[in-house]
Image (tube, grey):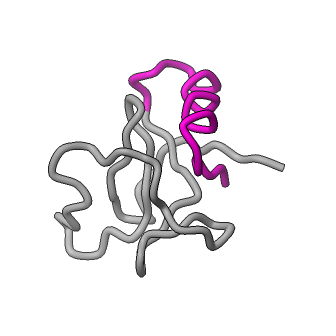
Amino acid sequence: MASARTSTENSIILQLMASPTSYSWLGLHRAPWKWSDKTNMSTMPWMTGNPDNARGNERCGYFYNGQTADALCSDIMPFICHK
């Protein structure tokens, strides 16, 4: 899945989404928070109050309105991939 390691990549992901207010999985997971390519997550802003692990096992990250939040990896939502 896609990683947004820079503000440019963040902007590209926003452009690819159906609408800027839609939800989409990214290649982001916790322990600590890293992208699927194993780089540290450092450039993406978190939504206010996140990550919060509200349901006790929120280990995956999604993108919404230019920000990230944590969720259960089993939640169903669209995703963005890259080559």
Q: Position of residue 65 (x, y in %)?
A: 38, 29
- Quadrant assignment, res 73: bottom left
Q: Is residue 3 left or right of residue 73?
A: right
> In the image shown, does 72 or 1 lie closer to the viewer?
1
Task: Please tell me which residue is depicted at 64% across the width and 29% down the height of the picture.
Answer: 12
Relative to 67, 48 lies left or right: left
Query: Left or right of 37: which side holds 62?
Result: left
Q: Is residue 15 magenta?
A: yes
Where residue 64 sits, quadrant-wise, is: top left
Please count the marks in the image. 0
Query: Can you give x and y, in whole percent of width and height, for residue 35 in the image?
Result: 57, 64
State the residue lying farthest toward the bottom.
Answer: 31
| Residue shown at 19% from the left, 62% from the top | 52
State left or right for residue 71 relative to residue 49: right
Q: Which residues are magenta?
A: 1-22
Question: For the N terminus, which image quadrant?
Answer: bottom right
Q: Where 61 falls versus 39 (above or below)?
A: above
Residue at figure coordinates x 57%, y 28% from the top left: 11
Q: Is residue 40 above or below residue 61?
A: below
Which residue is pictured at 43% across the width and 28% down the height? 22
Task: Spot the residue most to the right.
Answer: 83
Give the percent coordinates (x, y) of residue 34: 51, 69
